[in-house]
């Protein structure tokens, strides 16, 4: 006779424990205190063992029978259901301890030594507002690509396409940290390639190299009455041809002026990988001038805002400077990248691979990964110095005058 819920409910305690057979080697054990436990006898490797299934009525007859059947499948497959159950409990504890928020905060803590305080705060704030509120309490090992996409779509649907893309990169770094520390086994952010909308590609206005002498003269004469740090920022943008955001959000801990190198951390790069910028003598001179002006300020920004020094210079500052110089619609901060890319290849004769690496572009295709491991540091160092000297040459009417950018600012 099959065991029923009514039979389990009506089973009264006795002076000694007793069992009610439930079929398939499973039984309900009734204790003298009235507690009722589901148990199952089984054999593994010739040894008799006992599987604790649960307590009635928390575990119903139906659920107990289901657990028994699953245990039999494990036995048939050569596994010990008691060991599997223990492993499941350990995994549940691990999952509870390693939620996405816990792992993300641990990853964030590990980056603090290489980030500025403002940048670290910005990253954490983005996670707290848009990610933790949605999946922060979820075990990081259980989060899959569709779930992560659903969270990022919330940001995307409010029109914040760039932020959604940036959050995908940040989540990817957290997941890769989780893989490295054994807390998850896959970076599902990498599976979302092409799943999010991207901002419409804009073709930034850029001057031709033949127009640069006049532009450099306008910047030097400064009839537009630009602040000294605004002019330096514009000049450094020409010399380094990094993205505007990469320059204005730069912090002093990223620079090694003695070795002539600037390393932009992965978290600030569009492709999510650290990027090295060799510094020419002219760029180093400008940065030293900037240190002299702002070194006394309590800020880590290389180019702090003129109005609020605790904030970095805004993107609009450089855009407005170019406008006041008389080049509105003809040049942008991003335009210096296009200008350098074309001129260095055509006038200075450097290989495209070296230029693209300095632009932090990674080609697609079968050679992309191999190329990405190639830094071309010596070639890039030589190229950046030649580019600075070339700008000096056209600024001085043809003769190279090293350090032409290092002029006293008004």
Image (cartoon, helix red, strand yellow):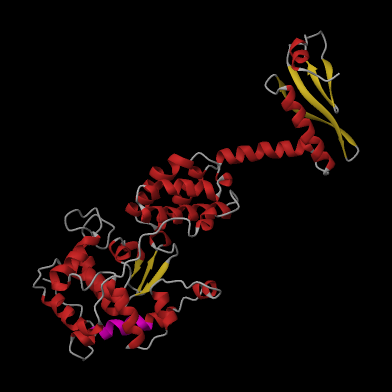
* Residue nearest the viewer, comparing 36 with 189: 189
Q: Residue at x 77, y 9 (%)?
A: 12
In this view, 179 is above or below 205: above
Count of marks overlaid on the render: 0
Report the residue that reaches farthest toward the right.
46
Residue drawn at x 48%, y 43% is 101
The rendered magenta stretch, by its main secondary structure, is classed as helix
Tell me: residue 136, above or below residue 115. Answer: above
Q: Quadrant of the N terminus?
A: top right
The magenta segment: 382-391
Image location (x, y in percent) of residue 386:
32, 85
Res 271 seen here: yes
Q: Is 110 displayed left or right of 25 in the figure? A: left
The quarter of the displayed image where residue 296 is located: bottom left
Q: Is residue 106 visible?
A: no
Left or right: 124 as drawn, with respect to 296: right
Taking the magenta stretch, the answer to whether it contains residue 390 is yes
Q: Quadrant of residue 14 in the image? A: top right
Q: Could you tell me residue 252's position as x and y percent?
A: 31, 63
| Image: 126 above or below 259 | above
Could you tell whether 285 is left or right of 49 in the image? left
Residue 328 at x, y percent in the picture: 17, 70
């Amino acid at each position: 006779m099959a065991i029923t819920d009514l039979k389990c409910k009506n089973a009264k305690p006795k002076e000694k424990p007793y069992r009610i057979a439930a079929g398939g080697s499973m039984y309900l054990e009734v204790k003298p205190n009235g507690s009722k436990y589901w148990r199952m006898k089984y054999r593994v490797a010739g040894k008799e063992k006992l599987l604790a299934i649960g307590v009635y009525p928390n575990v119903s007859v139906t659920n107990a029978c289901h657990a028994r059947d699953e245990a039999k499948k494990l036995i048939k497959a050569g596994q010990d259901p008691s060991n599997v159950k223990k492993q499941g409990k350990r995994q549940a504890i691990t999952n509870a301890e390693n939620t996405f928020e816990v792992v993300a905060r641990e990853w964030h803590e590990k980056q603090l030594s290489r980030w500025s305080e403002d940048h670290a705060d910005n990253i954490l704030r983005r996670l707290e507002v848009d990610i933790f509120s949605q999946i922060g309490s979820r075990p990081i090992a259980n989060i899959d690509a569709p779930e992560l996409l659903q969270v990022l779509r919330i940001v995307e649907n409010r029109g914040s396409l760039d932020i959604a893309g940036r959050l995908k990169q940040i989540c990817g770094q957290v997941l890769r940290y989780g893989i490295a520390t054994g807390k998850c086994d896959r970076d599902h952010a990498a599976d979302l390639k092409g799943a999010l909308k991207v901002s419409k590609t804009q073709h930034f206005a850029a001057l031709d190299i033949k127009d640069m002498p006049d532009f450099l003269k306008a910047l030097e004469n400064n009839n537009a009455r630009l602040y000294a740090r605004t002019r330096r920022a514009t000049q450094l943008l020409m010399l380094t041809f990094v993205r505007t955001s990469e320059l204005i959000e730069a912090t002093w801990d990223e620079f090694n002026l003695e070795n002539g190198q600037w390393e932009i951390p992965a978290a600030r790069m569009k492709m999510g990988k650290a990027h090295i910028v060799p510094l020419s003598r002219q760029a180093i001179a400008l940065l030293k001038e900037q240190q002299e002006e702002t070194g006394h300020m309590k800020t880590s920004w290389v180019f702090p805002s003129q109005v609020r020094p605790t904030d970095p210079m805004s993107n609009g500052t450089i855009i407005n400077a170019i406008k006041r110089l008389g080049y509105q619609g003809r040049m942008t901060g991003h335009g210096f990248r296009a200008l350098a890319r074309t001129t260095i290849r055509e006038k200075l004769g450097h290989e495209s691979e070296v230029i693209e690496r300095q632009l932090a572009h990674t080609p697609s295709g079968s050679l992309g990964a191999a190329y990405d491991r190639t830094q071309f540091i010596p070639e890039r160092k030589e190229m950046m110095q030649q580019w600075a000297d070339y700008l000096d040459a056209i600024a001085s009417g043809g003769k190279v005058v090293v350090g032409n950018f290092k002029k006293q600012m008004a």
